[in-house]
Image (cartoon, rainbow, N blue to C red):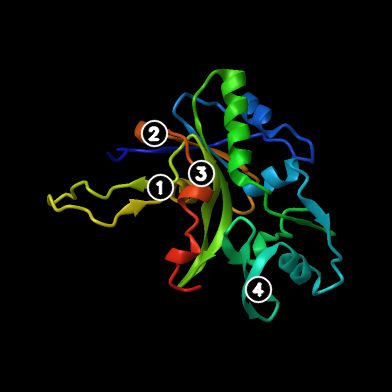
């Protein structure tokens, strides 16, 4: 079943997040939530709340590169000051997700240690504070192989399906689907980014109207990250 419509609601007035901020409690207090909503939270504020900030010398052109390499399980490709790495999470991305944007000069933001756990923490805080069952997606901006441009994807999730397996169901013409698995967590993250923007300072968006069948236990690490044995390019 596909939702007939979705509503994207930017959560206004979110405060500046610092290490030690109780992000789940803030989401519960400030977001106008309803049961069945999915909350998309940017990786940046999750990492800040979890203290994933490290100093980096802005005068050293190779400082970010060294930091990216230190966060990598392995380096897959190099081009100038860009490295494509496989992170300890299994993500294949540019510079291990190390980010210098929207952070004080002299610091870099690293990815959360366990984004799925971060999502569960926010979900559990909302459940405990508001008594609501919601889904949570932690989003980050990734490039895409073979396509230009950036798009937000899910790096962590809880309470909403990461992948919906349509294999064995019928398409609109009555033909059996043999290979279709929809990465709905990525689709939700990308939809929310249309409201967040890159300079609007909207780090939290409510996605309302998702199929309630999608609200279940989930994990980006278990469902989305492709095992090396299934990867034709590594």
Q: Which residue is mark 2?
A: 209
In percent of width and height, residue 179 lies at 28, 57
Q: Which residue is mark 4?
A: 83
Circle on res. 51: none
Q: Which residue is mark 1?
A: 163
In percent of width and height, residue 154 lies at 52, 50
Determine contact: label 4, label 2, CB under 8 Å: no
Taking the spot 72% from the left edge, 55% from the top edge, the residue there is 110
Classify 53 as above or below 147. above
Q: CA distance from mark 3 to mark 4?
A: 26 Å
Q: CA distance from mark 4 to mark 2?
A: 38 Å
The single residue placed furthest to the left in the displayed view is: 174
Q: From the image, state whether disc 3 or disc 4 is nearer to you.
A: 3
Determine contact: label 3, label 4, CB under 8 Å: no
Disc 2: CA contacts within 10 A as few (<14), some (14-19) or many (>=20): some
Mark closest to the chain's N terminus, 3 or 4: 4
Q: From the image, state whether disc 4 or disc 2 is nearer to you.
A: 4
Q: Nearer the viewer, residue 206 or 51?
A: 51
Mark closest to the chain's N terminus, 1 or 2: 1
Q: Secondary structure at mark 3?
A: loop
Mark closest to the chain's N terminus, 3 or 1: 1
Q: CA distance from mark 1 to mark 2?
A: 17 Å
Asked if residue 111 can be seen in this view, the reply is yes
Q: Which residue is mark 3?
A: 219
Q: Quadrant of the N terminus?
A: top left
């Amino acid at each position: 079943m596909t939702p007939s419509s979705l509503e994207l609601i930017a959560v206004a007035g979110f405060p500046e997040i610092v290490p030690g901020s109780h992000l789940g409690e803030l989401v519960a207090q400030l977001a106008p939530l309803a049961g069945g909503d999915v909350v998309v939270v940017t990786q940046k504020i999750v990492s800040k709340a979890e203290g994933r900030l490290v100093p980096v010398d802005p005068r050293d052109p190779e400082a970010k590169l060294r930091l990216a390499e230190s966060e990598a399980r392995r380096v897959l490709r190099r081009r100038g000051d860009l490295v494509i790495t496989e992170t300890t999470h299994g993500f294949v991305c540019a510079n291990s997700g190390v980010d210098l944007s929207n952070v004080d000069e002299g610091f870099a933001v690293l990815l959360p240690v366990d984004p799925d756990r971060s999502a569960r923490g926010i979900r559990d805080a909302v459940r405990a504070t508001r008594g609501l069952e919601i889904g949570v997606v932690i989003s980050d901006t990734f490039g895409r192989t073979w396509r230009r441009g950036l798009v937000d994807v899910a790096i962590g999730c809880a309470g909403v399906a990461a992948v919906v397996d349509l294999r064995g169901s019928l398409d609109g013409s009555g033909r059996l689907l043999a290979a279709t698995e929809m990465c709905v967590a990525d689709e939700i993250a990308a939809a929310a980014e249309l409201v967040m923007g890159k300079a609007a300072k909207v780090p939290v968006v409510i996605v309302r109207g998702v199929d309630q069948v999608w609200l279940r236990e989930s994990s980006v690490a278990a469902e989305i990250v492709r095992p090396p044995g299934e990867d034709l390019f590594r």
